[in-house]
Amino acid sequence: MKFFIDTANLAQIKEANDLGILDGVTTNPSLMAKEGVKGNEAIMNHYKTICEMVDGDISAEVFSTDFDGIIAEGKKLAAIHPNIVVKVPMIKDGVKAIKWFTDNGIKTNCTLVFSAGQAILAAKAGAKYVSPFIGRIDDTNWDGVELIAQIAHIYTLQGFETEILAASIRSSLHIVKCAEAGADVCTCPLDSILGLLKHPLTDIGLAKFLEDAKKM
Ligand code: G3P
């Protein structure tokens, strides 16, 4: 399973990248706004900086919701760097645009996916990634990880090549459960990645080894 970081914060991207286990980055308008990135030029420059920091797919989301607007925006984003993946919402014009991008050699990530039916449409349109938002599904008292397993089962059965990118990750346990359920990629906040390191027995064991090492 690939590890992406789900943020537009450059310090966090650097910290995850320095760990040596980072395969890519996902952003969205909320994450970009959180970093105070405003205006077209600043947005483009921010994506360029991320592409120069991380050697992997970098998702950049369109704001338009009509076919022509999505295509125009997506072309500009894709021109920033070969690693840019155009992130397109799961709406009618979005699906149409994903098909157009696929036919024209531009990689896409279909976002805001909450059902297996939506995931089938994204795969039919040729999206490189499909992003089910598992944390937001959990928020509605459904099991987001179950959706990952359902999509993985359908994609395997049908031979779809779209990669399942588990998004809206809220914990380290989510990452483990998504790996078990067959996600190809997990895009995570830095804290959830770092949380995978933690186990109290590791801390206790290390303290004992260090204490005994003094007697050697
Ligand atoms: O990758 C999508 C993600 O950014 C949404 O996460 O926590 O806002 O549901 P969240």
Image: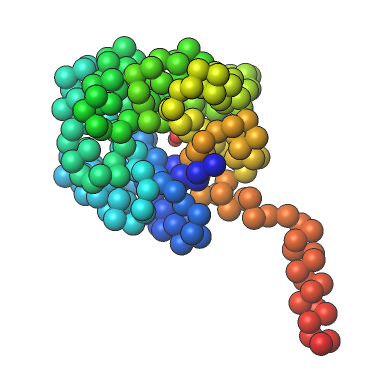
Let me know if residue 165 appears in the view.
yes
Check the picture and name the quadrant holding the C terminus. Answer: bottom right
Check the picture and name the quadrant holding the N terminus. Answer: top right
Expressed as whole percent of the image width and height from the top left, the position of residue 178 reads 60, 34
Quadrant of the image occupied by residue 121: top left
Quadrant of the image occupied by residue 31: top left
Q: Nearer the viewer, residue 160 or 90?
A: 160
Q: Nearer the viewer, residue 163 or 169?
A: 163
Task: Answer with left or right where residue 116 lies relative to residue 103.
Answer: right
Q: Residue at x 45, y 23 (%)?
A: 160
Q: Nearer the viewer, residue 108 or 211?
A: 108
Expressed as whole percent of the image width and height from the top left, the position of residue 56 reads 37, 48
Q: Residue at x 80, y 78 (%)?
A: 211
Task: Answer with left or right where residue 24 lies relative to residue 207.
Answer: left
Q: Residue at x 27, y 30 (%)?
A: 62
Expressed as whole percent of the image width and height from the top left, the position of residue 170 reads 57, 37
